[in-house]
Image (cartoon, helix red, strand yellow):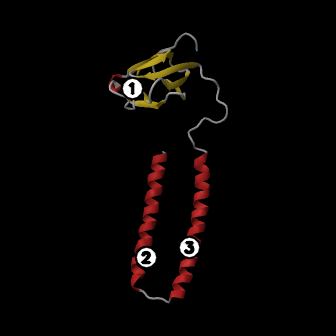
Amino acid sequence: MEQRIAVLVSAVLGAVLLVIFAGVARSANGTASPEAVATSAARWRKTVLWTLVLLFVPVIGYSLTKLPYASGAAAPAEVVVRVTGTQWAWTVTPDTVPVGKSVEIRVTGADVNHGFGLYDTNDRLITQTQAMPGFTNVIRHTFTAPGTYRVLCLEYCGLGHHTMFSRIVVTANTASR
Ligand SMILES: [Cu+2]
């Protein structure tokens, strides 16, 4: 939906720009006194300024409400998974989580920077963050389908980088819901 709006807005603004260019091109052969040009330009500048202010202040204000961050104090996650990237393996504890529960994945690095990438059962990247020594980056995710989710390293971290595979198994949870 947002992409469609962005395309539409870009197309409209592009068309407006084309009309302005055409107008400028048409009047390029005309002559006028420098005073008349200066007066006209000053009027235009004012119009453009206020149009931009009136257009963009509400748009920017609205877009701030759409930031993809959780608002306020979020409820604690039901499951916490600790992930450590090491040359060249992942430690994932626990590596099995139930479907439908909010999972907090705490990601850190033991030696150098790694890139924690989590892939769904169709090998599509669903979330990722940096695994950095001395820092813990937190991802919140709720798995909606059971299966084996692969963990890959997304940042070159040395000779064995390409061997850094792990997984999180999401189990169908029928017992406690
Ligand atoms: Cu790596």
Q: Quadrant of residue 66?
A: top right
**CA gap, disc 2 to disc 3?**
16 Å
Q: Which residue is mark 2?
A: 23
**CA gap, disc 2 to disc 1?**
55 Å
Which residue occupies the extreme front position in the image?
Answer: 111
The kind of residue tagged 1 is Leu
Residue 45 numbered tag: 3
Depth order, front residue of 68/81: 81
Above or below, 58 relative to 172:
below
Above or below, 99 relative to 126:
above
Residue drawn where x is 48% and y is 56% of the image: 9
| SS at circle 1 | strand
Q: Which residue is mark 1?
A: 152
Residue 170 numbered tag: none
Which residue occupies the extreme right position in the image?
Answer: 73
| SS at circle 2 | helix
Q: Quadrant of residue 15?
A: bottom left
Question: Would you say the beta carbon of the disc 3 residue lies within 8 angstroms of ligand 1?
Answer: no
| SS at circle 3 | helix
